Structures are given as C-alpha cells and as structure tokens.
Amino acid sequence: MIKIENISKSFDQIKVVDNISTEFEKGKTNLIIGQSGSGKTVLMKCLVGLLNIDQGKIFFDDKPFDDLSFSNLSDLRKEIGMVFQGTALFDSMSVLENIIFPLRMFTNKSNDEMIYRGNEVIKRVYLKDANNKLPSEISGGMKKRVAIARAIVLNPKYLFCDEPNSGLDPKTAIIIDNLIKEITEEYNITTVINTHDMNSVMEIGEKIIFLVNGRKIWEGSKQEIFDTDNESVNNFVYSSELFKKVRDIQIKGK
Amino acid sequence: MKIFFYIGSYFLMIRNTFRKFTKWNVLKTLIFKDIDDLIIRSFGIVAFISFFVGGVVAIQTALNIENPLLPGNLVGFATRQSVILEFAPTFISIIMAGKVGSFITSSIGTMRVTEQIDALEVMGINTHNYLIFPKIVALLLYPFLITFAMFLGIIGGYIVSIYGGFSTSYDFIQGIQLDFRVYHLFYAYVKTTLFAFILATVPSYHGYYMKGGALDVGKASTLSFVWTSVVIIIVNYIVTQLLLA
C-alpha cells in the first residue's frame, strides 16, 4: 500500500500538484486520471522520487519515503518498478539485456541465472522472438511489454506505469492494460497507473482518483465513476461520443 | 549571476560522480565501451589533422626565415616546439571538443529526453557515476592520443620539409633534437590531462542537465562545444602562465 498525505509540488510558484491525499491499495490497479496537464505525471514523479515534493508525506507500507536513510532508500528503490510513457528502454542494449539490466545492477546472479530469469519474465509478458533485437527494431506494443518485463524482473512490491497504453492501437492497448492487471493480481503488488484513456478505466480501474489542475477532485471505484454527479468527472468521462451513447443506452434501459 | 548557478551545479555533479559507485562488473563494460567510442575511434581524425598541421607549421616557419644567417635546423626546432607545446595538446583538444564533446552531450542528452536517465534513477542508480565516471576514466588515455598527435605532427613537418625542399633531413633531425627540454613535455602532459577531464565533464554536464526535445539535443551539443572550447582556452592560459612564465 502507498499512502500520500497532503503532498504539493510547484514549479515557478505554479502549483502543479496541490495538497493531494489518498491511498493506493495493494493487489489493485490504482488509476490516476485527468486531462493532459492535470498533474498526473508530476504526481507520479513525486511518488517515485524523481521530483522532490514541497510539502506532505509519502509512505510505502508505512515507511516514510522522505525520512529513509540512504541505504534503506536504496533498498526501497529496488522494490519499485516503473514503466515510462516512452518506455525509456536503453537504445544500445538488446531486449534481453534491457530486461536483465536491474538483475545485473542489484543481484549477484550468474549470467546463466540472469538469462533464465529474463526468459521467465519475457514469457510472462508474452513476448516472442525478440531477445536479441534492439528497441529500435521492435513495435510500440512490444516495447511496452519489454518495459513491463524490465519493471517486474526484480519482483517489485510497487509498480508505476505512466500512460502505459499511449501511442498504441485500441486492441494492443487493452492487451497491455490486462497484462498489467494480471501481473498486479499475480504478484499482489501495488500498481499505480496514470492514464487519460477511459477504455483503461473500464478495463482495469479498481480504484480511481481524478485530478483537475493538480487537485484531487474525485476518488472512487470504476462503478462509481459512471454514477457520480461530479460535473468535472462527467465532463471528462463523457467527452467521447462512444461513452455518451453508452450513457444514453443506460438511461433508456432504466 | 546565473553563471554561478551553472558553475555550482557543475561542481556538485563532479562530487556526485565520485560517490556511490556502480558495480565494478557493469562499470568495467562501460569504461571499455567509452575507450572505444572516445579514444580508439578518434585516432583517424587526430592522425589526419596532426600530420597536415605539422606540415603547415614547417612550411610557414621555413617561409618566414629566409634570412641565410638563420640556422637550417630552425625549421625542425620550430616544428617540434609548436607541435609539442601547443598544436597537439590544445589544437587537438579543440577538435576533440567538437568530436568527442558533441558525442557525449548528444548521447547523454538523448538519454535525458527519452527518460532513460529517469529510469536509471528510479532503479536507485547514481546516474552521475554511471554515466560520467566511465568517460573520465576512458579519457585518462587521452595523453596517449596526444602523444600520437605529437609524433605524427613532427613526422608531417619532416616529410613536407624534405619533399617540399624547405629543409634537409639532417637539418630537420638536428632541429628536433636541439635544446630538448623534458619539462616542456611535462607541461604538455599536465595540460593534456586537464583538457581530458574538461572534455569528459563539460559536455556531460550539458547533456545531463539539458531540457526539452530532440531539437534541444542539437542546441545542447553546440553549446557544449562552445563552452568546452572556452574552458580549454582559459585553462590553457592559466597552466601556461603557471608552468612556463
């Protein structure tokens, strides 16, 4: 579980994350949703320590992220996996090398053991015939799978995904979403996903927080988001014609 | 006043580079890769430039000392002094600021814009040490490159002098042996080592702290070349003042 209390972050006196408190639950896919520029990515970068927060507290299973000693913080970081929006794969390394990179850095496994573990996670993310290819030689969907495989190779307790299905066709996006959900349940990890894609909310959203201009406007489950009276949430959820039609059908059905 | 901020963050970067070391097995691979990228792959351009610069120095010296009272070995002497004291260490370093400096800035800058550096940081890796330390170690071999440049510069001067009819082989060889001081080599290697450190760190700084997208990587590379050259020229002046004046 990850708990955040009143965290804020400003850039040049503009508050990008404004006094947000919430809990991200273990074994669930927790979604942070909102329009582009609502502060989702900044919030996630604060959570993983890429940005220092101006105020507030972050707890990883009751361990305060900011107050940890250097060695404890290093240990905690090994329990965090992250999938970046642009995948952030290392260009000069092959797919397999990318995946076993965290093993090479933080374990004393032999080369054979690392390759064995690498192949295990490659199989887990349903990646085929790509071990020796460079990231530039594989498709967007495959890159996302490699990024997920790299993020889970050390068996993390916390998984962060920044727009994991951006730039993917709808079918591949659903496959990636479901893969993340499967992994979350299988390894019982706390997963936090940034997205603005309502299809992801429909597919895998278990706990959802909704941001507008850096503020948490709404929090609830997938079922609750479609029934809420909150105007901002409704404007966001029903911004596409498809969801408007779904709502109309639901109203007619009632 | 922003210049003080940049200078401060440069020295903080240097401090962090020598903290929390990456695993030796990983570091070793990175060092060998950087030796290949930064040193081995620079031999060609350094050889080409050194040979012809040495030749031009010899021709210009010869054309400016037509007085028959001046000794014939002056062409060899002037070529040796110019190449060892200035052309090989400083001129080649400016060229390397363009070649190696741009490479370092663009490779680290690309890692920055594609979030690869963020990915390393999330894993808890000291990115300064991981990215910059191997380059500093690789460029410890830079004096070998400059020695090679000195040798080829003098060879270039010799060949051009002989085949251009500006000096005889005997005079030229006498010239390069005339009044040879080991201290001049010491001076050349001191500044070469300092330039190597500048070549590794200033472009790394520009790549690491760049912001923006692909276009900004190009801008950062240009800026890196300008600042690396400026720092080399300033350090060259200071070292010369301290060691030779």
Image (cartoon, grey):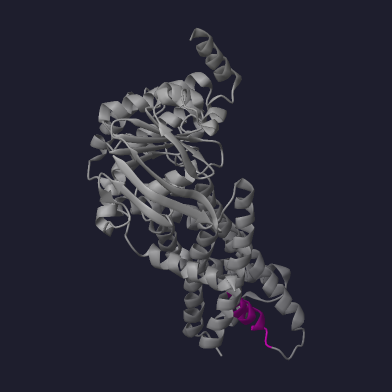
Camera-side residue of B103 and B60: B103
Residue B80 colored magenta?
yes
Q: Is residue B129 left or right of residue B95?
A: left
Residue A251, placed above or below residue A146 = above
Which residue is located at x 47 percent, y 72 percent? B193
Q: Is residue A54 left or right of residue A155?
A: right
Camera-side residue of B109 and B49: B109
Which residue is located at x 72 percent, y 69 percent? B164
Does the rendering let one see residue B97?
yes
Q: Which residues lie in the magenta part?
A: B71-83
Does the rendering let one see residue B120?
no
Residue A38 colored magenta?
no
Q: Residue A154 at what x, y percent from top left? A: 28, 38
Which residue is located at x 49 percent, y 67 percent? B9
Please name the predominant secondary structure of the magenta segment in the image: helix
Q: Residue B132 at what x, y percent from top left? A: 44, 59
Q: Quadrant of the N terminus of chain A?
A: top left
Q: Is residue A61 left or right of residue B234?
A: left
Give the total of numbered labels: 0
Q: Residue A202 at what x, y percent from top left? A: 45, 22
Which residue is located at x 28 percent, y 31 percent? A27
Q: Residue A174 at what x, y percent from top left? A: 45, 21
Camera-side residue of A176 and A10: A10
Which residue, as the protein is rendered here, is positioned at the far top? Answer: A253
Asked where in the image residue B221 lies, by quadrant, the reply is: bottom right
Camera-side residue of A184 and A89: A184
